[in-house]
Every structure is written in C-alpha cells, then in structure tokens.
Image (cartoon, helix red, strand yellow):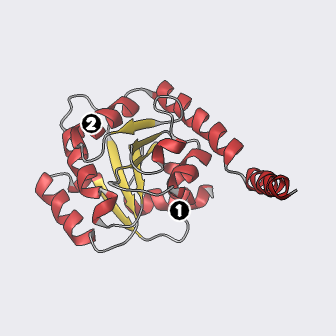
Amino acid sequence: LAEEVETARRTYGITRQAVILAVGRLSREKGHADLLQALSILSRVPGIPEFRAVIVGGGPERANLTALALRLGIQDRIVMAGFQKDVRPFYRMATMLTLPSHSEGSPYVLLEAMMAALPVAATAVGGVPEHIEDGITGLLVPQRDPAAMAETLQKLLTNPPLCKQLGAAGFLYAAKHHTFEAYIESLITFYQSCEADFS
C-alpha cells in the first residue's frame, strides 16, 4: 500500500501539504459546493498551513465544481481525483476527512475514515451524529455553513494533537462497533431476543 500512496502523491503533485479528503458521489446533496466555499475562506486565513483538498468521486456536479473552484481562485488547492476503485491510498495519505453533506443515511465513508484513524469534520445530518460524538470521535458542523466548516478545518489543520486524539478515539469506536465480529454479535443478540419473544 505504501507504493500506491507514493504513486498517488506523485500523480497529484502532493508533497508535504496537509491533505483534506472528501469521498463521495459528486451530486448536489453531498455539499461539495459548500466545501469549496469553506476552502476558499480557509485559504485566506493568515498563516494557515499549506493544504490540498482531494475530492474522490465521480458524478454530475464535476464540471460545476471545477468551474466554482476556478471562480473562487482555489483551483491550485483542489485535486479532483474522480472515481477510484481503491480508496485506501487516499485515506492513508490524508490528514483528515471532511463530509459536507446536506443529507446522509449512515455513511460508510465515516467508518472507513475512522478505521484509518483519521479525524473527521462532518455535517450533523442524518445518521452522522449516531457515529460522531462531537469533540470526542470527530467534529460536527452545521449543514450548509461554509464559514463553520472552514473554522472546523482550520482547528484541525492547526492542532495536530487534536487530530491525533480524535483519530484515535474514532478508530476505537469503529473497531469496537463496526467490525465483522461486532456485526455477528448484534445478529446473535437480535435472534436471541426474537426467540425470547416467541417462547
């Protein structure tokens, strides 16, 4: 996997910059336009660490997002990586994951990021708060609020100990509750409760 990470870094021209990762279909409800607005705000913060935002995914909004990045003057900070069969190298090279969605079910991308020990900044929509305890296993942000997202990403970019703390807590959460073994245990408990109901 280390070789794939190096290949991805070379392909997208990422050296030592922090990597803000977003993974998901490029459709309006995923909130990527809000994310670009947030990144525009973030890029103007004095003394902000150098960063690149890597957006993994394909979809109907790609052209609009590319045009928006150009209008905002942040095209050099954005990598549109398109659809990827194997997202693991991107998780490995990322500094954090951001999920700017307007609506979500129970997003698997959160658990993937947690299993990679990445700190997460996500909008508090749908099933997201079921997985993220704000300030403990990640950071929650109001939806459709680019300024709040920018502030949260700035907090992560400028506070490596916080990133490490959130990443470790997120990993423990995902490892405890969302492994295959945990899934089997929940099924057994469910079937036992069904048996008790009918006995």
Measured from the top left, where is residue 145 in percent x and y?
24, 42
Q: Amino acid at mark 1?
A: Val
- Please say if 85 is above or below 118: below
Residue tagged by mark 1? Answer: 87
Quadrant position of residue 86: bottom right
**Residue at (21% x, 32% y) in the render:** 45
**Residue at (29% x, 56% y) in the render:** 31
Few, some or many C-alpha atoms within 10 Å of disc 1 (few <14, some 14-19, many ≥20)? some
Measured from the top left, where is residue 66 in percent x and y?
22, 65
Quadrant position of residue 184: bottom right
Measured from the top left, where is residue 97 in percent x and y?
44, 47
Q: Nearer the viewer, residue 187 or 138?
A: 187
- Please say if 157 is above or below 93: above
Residue tagged by mark 2? Answer: 148
View extreme (front): residue: 199
Q: Amino acid at mark 2?
A: Ala
Q: Secondary structure at mark 2?
A: helix
Q: Is residue 95 left or right of residue 169?
A: left
Query: How far apart are the alpha carbons under marks 1 and 2?
Result: 27 Å
- Please say if 159 is above or below 167: above
